[in-house]
Amino acid sequence: MVIGIIGKGKMGRDIFNEFFQFDYDMIMICRKSEDVEEVQASIDKQLKKMLKRGYINQAEYEKKLSALIVTSDLAALKNCHMVIESVYEDKKLKQDIFEKIEAIVGEDCILASNTSSIPLKLVFEKCRKKDRCLGVHYFYPVKVMRTVEINKTSFTDNAYAQKVYQVLQSIGKQPIELEEAANMVLTKMLSILTTQAYKIYEEGYLTIEEIDKLLKENLLTLGLFEIVDSTGIGIILESIENFINDRYTKLFTPLYNKGKKVIQEGYLGGSGSKGIGAYEQERPKELKSLGDDELSEYKQNIILRLQSLLINETVYAILNQNVNKDKINEAVKEVLGLSDDLSAMLKNAGSQRITACLLNSLETTQDDIYRPLDLSIFNDN
C-alpha cells in the first residue's frame, strides 16, 4: 500500500514516521523544493541510526530506502492508495491541495485531511469524487496518542472509512469513527473546557496561572490556558468559530471576544509570542477576596463544574450524534489527559452532585448547555 503525506511540519512528519515504521511505501510531499533535501537527510540519518543500533538489518534498511520518496512534486502521488493532508489550518490552502491531487491520483485513492476544526464539506468543496473524502485527525504527540478521529461526512462512503480504520489499526492506533454532526468532537470538548475556564477566570477570584495550576493538580495534564497560548490564539479562535452554534454561543463568546482583543494588541500566542496569560499578567486586576475555607470550597467547585460540563457534553454526543460510548469515554481520557475516564469521574463525584452542579449553572447563567442529560448512560460501565 502506498501512502502519501502532504506537509513536512511537526504533525506531518510525525504522521509520516508512524507509517514509516511499518510495511508501507511512503511519499512525503514538501511545499518547497529546498525542503526536500533537509527532510531526506533527516530520514536517512534516522534509518542509519536504527541500522547501527540493530533495530533493523541491512536488508530492511535498503527496503525502507527503496520504499521512500521525498519530493515537492505532487505528481509523485499518482499511485497512492491514501493521501493524508497535514498542512496548517487554512481552508483555501486545503481546498487547493485537494483540487490538485484529485486530478493526479486514481479514482479509489482515499483523500484525508488532518484538520482539527475546519468543516470537511469546506475542505473538500472543490473535489469531484467526494465519497472517498474524510477527515483523519491525529493528536499531539502523535507517537504517544493512540486515539485518531475518523471524521466522516454525509458524502463519505463507509467502505473507504472502514479501509482507513483497518490501516490505522495496523499501526497500533485506536480509531474512533464520527458522523458529520460529531466531527472533531475531541477538539470541541477542549474548546468547551477552555471557554468554561475563561468564564471562571472572569469571576475574579483566581488568576489564569492559579486556574491552570489547579487544573494540573486535579484534572488535566496541561493547563487550559497553557494550551491556548502554546497553540496560538488565532487557531483557538478559528476552532471556536467553526464549532459555534446556538448551543455554544453563550459559553464561547467571552473568550472569543477577549481573544480578538488580545490579538489586536499583539499577543498572538504560539511559538515565540506572548499569549493571553502574559496579557492578563501584565494588566493585573484586584481579585475578589475569599477566606481560606471559602477559597478551598471554591476551587473544589471549579473542578466539579468542569467535570460536570465535560460529562454532560459527552452524553450529548452519545445521545444526539451517534458517538460510541465506550470509545469516546477512552478517547476523552487520553486526549485531554484526564486521570480518570468519564464513567469513573461520574462514579467518584456522584450523579446527584453532577446534576446539582449543572442545575446551579443553568439557574445562574440561563444557558441551556448546562441542562442535565441522562447521565445514567454511564451506569453500566
Image (tube, rainbow, N blue to C red):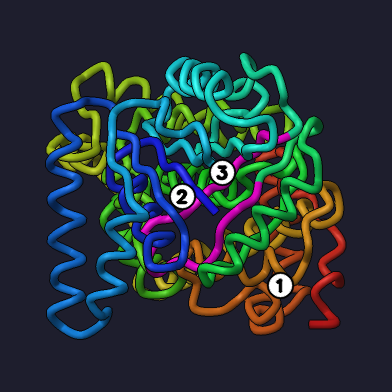
Q: Report the residue at 58% width, 61% height from top.
A: 168
What segment is highlighted magenta in the picture? Answer: 132-150
Q: Earlier in the sequence, mark 2 or mark 3?
A: 3
Which numbered mark, 2 or 3, is in the foreground of this view? 3
Which amino acid, by three-letter code, is at mark 3?
Met
Tell me the residue that label 2 is attached to: 197
- Which structural element holds mark 1? helix
x then y, percent, for residue 346: 69, 76
Q: Amino acid at mark 1?
A: Arg
Secondary structure state at the residue bearing disc 2: helix
Please tell me which residue lies in front, 292 or 88.
88
The magenta stretch spans residue 140 = yes
Q: Position of residue 176 (x, y in %)?
A: 67, 59
Residue name at image x 58 percent, y 23 percent: 102
Residue hosting label 1: 353
Circle number at residue 101? none
Asked if residue 213 lies left or right of residue 224, the reply is left
Q: Is residue 32 left or right of residue 79?
A: left
Give the residue at mark 3: 82
Residue 240 in picture, x, y percent from top left:
52, 32
For residue 351, side relative to residue 237 (left or right)? right
